[in-house]
Amino acid sequence: MPDLTYQPATYYTVMVRCNTAGDGTEKHPPCVNYQREWQVDEVYSNAGQPVIQCGPCQNLVEILAATKMDPQPEVS
């Protein structure tokens, strides 16, 4: 994972990848998103520690890149 620094209380657009390969058995197959990269919009930095899960396998994804949103979304 690249060494990314996030500002607290800030929104980012991020590129992620699921690395859940499974173990090759029917009980633990690879995730349908395995090695797929996709963009996630409006990711909140959570005090500098964003966490994103893959929907199908529920495991954490690898964050490949992050771009601070400008302008930041308005929150009320």
Image (tube, helix red, strand yellow):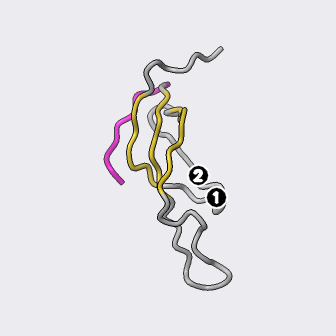
Above or below, 38 relative to 59: above
**Where are the magenta residues, as a range?**
1-9
Image position of 59 (left or right of 37): right
Which amino acid type is marked by label 1? Gln
Which residue occupies the foreground of this view, 46 or 36? Answer: 36
Q: Residue at x 46, y 18 (%)?
A: 71
Image position of 5 (left or right of 71): left
Separation of residues labelled 2 and 1 (CA atoms) = 6 Å
Which amino acid type is marked by label 2? Gln
- The local secondary structure at tag 1 comes to loop
Above or below, 12 relative to 19: above
Q: Which residue is drawn at 57% across and 73% down?
A: 30
Image position of 34 (left or right of 76): left
The residue under label 1 is 58
- Mark 2 and mark 1 residues within 8 Å of each other at the beta carbon: yes
Q: Quadrant of residue 74?
A: top right
Above or below, 76 relative to 3: above
Q: Residue at x 50, y 40 (%)?
A: 50
Q: Residues within 10 Å of mark 2 (few under 14, many from 20)?
A: few
Image position of 39 (left or right of 74): left
Q: How crowded is mark 1: few (under 14 residues within 10 Å), some or many (20 or more)?
A: few
Q: Is the magenta stretch mostly helix, strand or loop?
A: loop
In x, y percent, where is residue 31? Answer: 59, 68
| Residue 74 included in the magenta stretch of the image | no
N-term mark: 2 or 1? 2
What label does residue 39 carry, if any?
none
Figure disc tally = 2
In x, y percent, where is residue 33? Answer: 56, 63
The residue under label 2 is 53
